[in-house]
Image: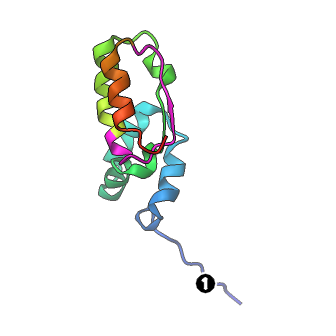
Amino acid sequence: MEEEFKFRQWDELLPDALGLIFRNLSLQEVLIVVPRVCKSWEKEVKGPYCWQEIDIEEWSKNRYPENLDRMLCLLIPRSCDFFCKLCVSGLSDKLSFEFIANNAKSL
């Protein structure tokens, strides 16, 4: 007897499941590669499920403060105030801390 297998399409995965999968990728892959795979992945990678935990500590080492600030301004709003973890290195001014505090209502 032949079994019938039904395969789900990647774009049918729940957004939080994709977010969990994307967390295993590097920051560069999530920001550059994933959005180019398909429109549904592009939408999900810009949504809050991928950014509940923001870990840019390794990336942020030896970066200019203005590049670090731009990255935080890009990623933190994507979490829609639902991020619960932020790992970053090298914050140097009060404005960066204020931005994080103002956008970290769930912390």
Of all residues, the one furthest to the bottom in this rendering is 1
* Residue at the image point whose x is 38% and y is 23% from the top: 97
Q: Amino acid at mark 1?
A: Glu
Residue 35 relative to residue 86: left or right: left
- The residue under label 1 is 4
Magenta span has 72? no
Q: Quadrant of residue 73?
A: top left
Question: From this viewpoint, is residue 32 visible?
Answer: no
Dominant secondary structure, magenta? loop
- Vertical relation: 99 (above or below) 6: above
Q: Quadrant of residue 77?
A: top left
Q: Residues within 10 Å of mark 1 (few under 14, many from 20)?
A: few
Mark 1 falls on what kind of element? loop
* Residue at the image point whose x is 34% and y is 44% from the top: 78
Measured as percent of width and height from the top left, residue 52 is found at 47, 45
Measured as percent of width and height from the top left, residue 83 is found at 46, 43
Measured as percent of width and height from the top left, residue 24 is found at 55, 41
Measured as percent of width and height from the top left, residue 1 is found at 71, 90
* Residue at the image point whose x is 34% and y is 16% from the top: 94
Residue 92 relative to residue 61: left or right: left
Q: Which residues are magenta?
A: 77-91
Q: Who is closer to the viewer here, 84 or 66?
A: 84
Q: Who is closer to the viewer here, 59 or 53?
A: 53
Magenta span has 83? yes
Question: From this viewpoint, is residue 70 visible?
Answer: yes
How did the renderer colour the structure?
Answer: rainbow
